[in-house]
Image (cartoon, rainbow, N blue to C red):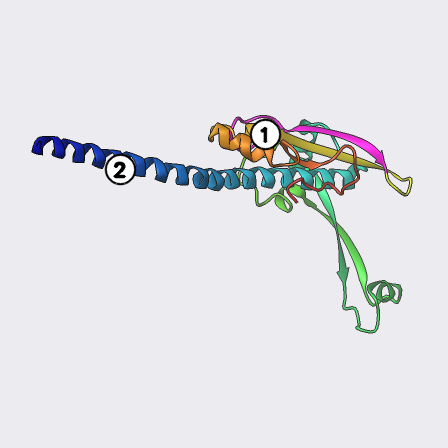
Amino acid sequence: MKALNIIIKIILFVAIIVLAYYIVVGIKKPIDFEEERNIRLRKNIDRLIDIRTAQNSYREATGFFTPDFDTLIDFIKTGDIRVVRAIGFVPDTLTEREAIQRGIVSRDTFYIPIKDSLFKHIKYPIENIRYTATGDIVEWEMDTSSVMTGSNVRVWVFSAHAELKKILEGLDEQLIINYISLRPEDILRVGSLNDADNSAGNWE
């Protein structure tokens, strides 16, 4: 009888340990998922912001966006941006325009390489801007179009996006499904082909 009590106590102890383990895992799993999800989203949002910066610079230089990553990457590597600098001091009683008209201030225009200014922060090969940064690495789907604004002005727009399930690939599948089901879109996107949204991202 004594031996039976010992066996029962051992079984109960093991059961408690196993139960405690699953409780901890059940609590920790969504916390770990959220942390890793946020890290992955941040990396990919940063890449979309780089694409937006490149596209806006390309439009400033050419008048329109490009749907082609080869063109965009070549522009980042070889393109320049125009910088206008005011030379002189603008008195408090005048605007900069008035100071220029009076000859107190002059403007100097010069060009600097994009890769050494707007993209000097990039720590990945610039060719990789075309790909997502995490998960199942895929190329961003990028395209351009033009839309009519409410004031009847036709403007160029662009969009680049990838599926969230690709970006989060490798994490818990059910938690991925739960997360995506709560979002208005199942993609991570910058810009829009349907609206003149100033190239906003759907995380903003």
Q: Residue furthest bottom?
A: 93
Q: Nearer the viewer, residue 111 or 118?
A: 118
Q: Is residue 85 left or right of residue 116?
A: right
> Dot 1: what SS?
loop
| Image quadrant containing the C terminus | top right
Residue drawn at x 79%, y 68% as measured from the top left: 90
Task: Read off the magenta span.
Answer: 132-148
Give the residue type that dot 2 points to: Ile
Q: Is residue 194 above or below residue 38?
A: above
Task: Confirm whether residue 201 shows in the render.
Answer: yes
Where does residue 199 sit, x and y in percent of width and height? 73, 40
Front residue of this view, candidates 89 and 21: 21
Q: Please give the label number shown on residue 131.
A: 1
List the residue tagged with mark 2: 16
Nearer to us: label 2 or label 1: 2
Q: Nearer the viewer, residue 71 or 13?
A: 13
Q: Are marks 2 and 1 in contact (CB under 8 Å)?
A: no
Q: Residue furthest left?
A: 2
Mark 2 and mark 1: Cα distance apart in space: 47 Å
Residue 139 image offset from top left, x and y in percent: 61, 26
Left or right placement of residue 3 versus residue 117 in this view: left
Q: Residues within 10 Å of mark 2 (few under 14, many from 20)?
A: few
Q: Could you tell me the amino acid type at mark 1?
A: Tyr
| 96 lies above or below 15 | below
| Residue 152 x %, y % | 91, 39
35 falls in the magenta region? no
Image position, residue 202 (x, y; %): 67, 39
Q: Is residue 143 magenta?
A: yes
